[in-house]
Amino acid sequence: MKQLKPITNKLLWLFALGQFGWSLLSGVVSNWMVYYYTGTPDAQNPNTGIFATMITQEPILFKLTLIGLVMAVGRVFDAITDPLIAGWSDRSDYKGGRRIPFMRAMAIPFALCTLGIFALPQTSNIVINDAILFILLLVFYLFMTMFCTPYNALIAELGDTQQHRINVSTYISLTFILGQSISFLLPNLAGALESVAGQAGSIRLAIAIMSAIACLAMLIPAFSINERDYIDSKPSDTKPFKSLAKTFSNGQFRRFVYSDVIYFFALTLFQTGLPFYETKLMEIEDTWTFLLTATMTGISVLLYPLVNFLAKKFGKKTLIIIGFFTYSCVFAITTFCGKGLQWGFIIAVAAAIPMAILGILPQACVADVAELTRLETKEDRSGMFFAARTFAFKMGQALAAIIFTSMTIAGTPKSYRMTALIAFICCFIGACLFFAYNEKKILEKIDALKQN
C-alpha cells in the first residue's frame, strides 16, 4: 500500500485558492447580472440596467421576467447536473485522481463563459440576445458544477480529521468571501477603465480582468496538488441517482438540508437585492458597494479565529443556529432601513457575524456526515454528499431568482422591502428547523468507529 503524504495546513491553504477563483466568477454573475440587465439608470447610478435594452424586459409569463426565468432555469439545470457530475467524479479512476482532473479541465472554460454572459448578448436582435444569454447561463452553471462539485468533495477527503475539517472549512470560507467581496469592486474597476473603453466596454473589460484572476486562482491548486499523494481514493460502484437517493435517506443529512435550503433561499433573495437595497432604499452610489462589502468582509475575517475556537469548544450546531438568527435580524433591519450611508454600514457590520459562522461551519457539517457514512459503509461518496446539498439549496436559489425578479418589476422601494421581509421570515424558520440536527451523535459515532 502506498504511503500517503501528511495533510498540512499549507496544503489546505493552497487548496483554498480554488475557492477564491470560483467564488469571484460566481459573484460577478450573481451580484451584477440582474443589476446590469434590469432596471433603469439615473444620475446617481448611470450603470444600472446598462444592458437592459439588449434583452426582453416585459413579463413573458404571468409576472415572470426573462431574466428571472433564465436565472431560475439555470439554477434548476445546475441542481440536476450536480448529482450527475458528483456520480461521475465518485466513480472515476483517472491517473490524476477522482477530483483534480475535473478542476484542470474546467477552470479556463468557466472563466471564459463568465465574460461571455456580459459580452456576447449584444446583437441588434433582442430575441437572439435572449437566446444567447439563456444558453450561456446554462453553460456557465454546467462549468461551475464540473469544477465545484469535485472541488467540494476534496473538503471531506482532505479533512481527514475533525481539526482539518474545521480548518479547511475556515480557509475556504475566507477565500470564498474574499472572492465575493472583490466581485463587488466591479463598478469601481469599470469606472477606472471608462476613459479607455467607454461606459459599457469598461464593465466588460473589468469582468475580463476579474475572470483572468479567477482562472489563475483555480489553476494553481489544480496543477500544484497531486491528489494521489494525499488521498487513497477508490471509485464508488453506486450509480449517480441511486447514490443521491442513498444520500437523502440519511436522516441527519436531511435535517441539515431542510434548514440549509430555506437559508439559501433567503440569502439569495438578499444577495440579489443588495445592490438595489443600497442604491434604491438607502440611496447610496453603487461605487460604495465595494467599501461596504469590504467592511463586512474585514470584520468577518477578524471573527474567523473566534468562530474556529468556539466551534471546537461548543460545537458547530449552536453557532450555526446563532448565525441563522443573526442573519434574520440583518434582513429585518434591511426591511425597515432609511436613507443614508450609515444604514449600509449598520447592515455590513451586523452581517459580518453570521457571514463568519455560516461561511465556515455548514461545509464541516456535510464533511462530518460524509465521513461517518464512509466509515459505516466502507464506500466513499463524498462528492455526492456535497452535490446533494447543492442540489437542494440551488432549488431554493432558483425559486428566489423567480420571486425577486417578479416582485421587483415595478422597481419601487416597497417591492424591494418586501423581498427583504420574505428573507427575514424564511431565515427565522431555517434557524428553528436546525434544532433537529444532532451533531453530538454524529461525532460520537465517528470517534467510536475510528477506534475500532
Image (cartoon, rainbow, N blue to C red):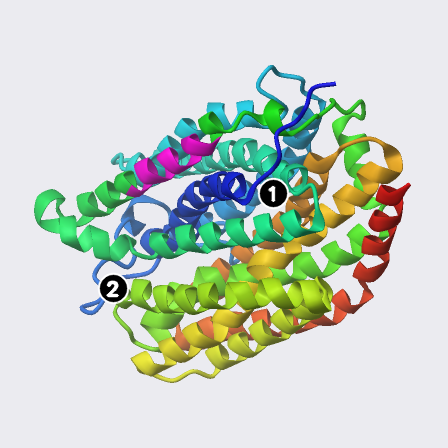
Front residue (pair 366, 339): 366
Q: Name the dominant secondary structure of the magenta segment.
A: helix
> Residue 304 in magenta?
no
Observer-side mark, 1 or 2, equals 2
On whether residue 219 falls in the magenta region, the answer is yes
The answer to whether 188 is drawn above or below residue 419 in the figure is above
Residue extending furthest right? 452
The answer to which of marks 1 and 2 sits earlier in the sequence is 1
Mark 1 surroundings: few (<14), some (14-19) or many (≥20) residues within 10 A: many
The secondary structure type at the circle numbered 2 is: helix
Farthest residue, direction top: 95
**Who's the residue at 59% across and 51% down the image?**
167
Q: Is residue 276 above or below residue 446?
A: below
The residue identified by callout 2 is 287
Q: Secondary structure at mark 1?
A: helix
What range of the chain is rendered magenta? 210-221
Question: How far across and down, in percent of the image, does residue 102 sit?
Answer: 54, 25
Query: Residue 48's x, y, as percent?
Result: 28, 59
Q: Which mark is residue 76?
A: 1
Which of the image's four quarters has the N terminus?
top right
- Measured from the top left, where is residue 107 in percent x and y? 44, 30
Q: Which residue is at a point 17% across and 55% down the rendered structure image? A: 191
Q: What residue type is disc 2 on?
A: Thr
Q: Dividing the image into 4 quarters, which one contains the C terminus?
A: top right
What kind of residue is marked 1? Val
Question: Can you give x and y, in whole percent of width and height, for residue 89 in the image?
Answer: 65, 26
Nearest the eye: 67 or 322? 322
How many C-alpha atoms fall within 10 Å of the one at disc 2: few (<14), some, or many (≥20)? some
Query: In the depicted view, which residue is nearer to us: 448 or 375?
Result: 448
Q: Between marks 1 and 2, how big is the CA–CA gap?
A: 32 Å
User: Do we see residue 156 in this rendering?
Assistant: yes
- Residue lying at 67% horizontally and 56% vertically, measured from the top left: 261
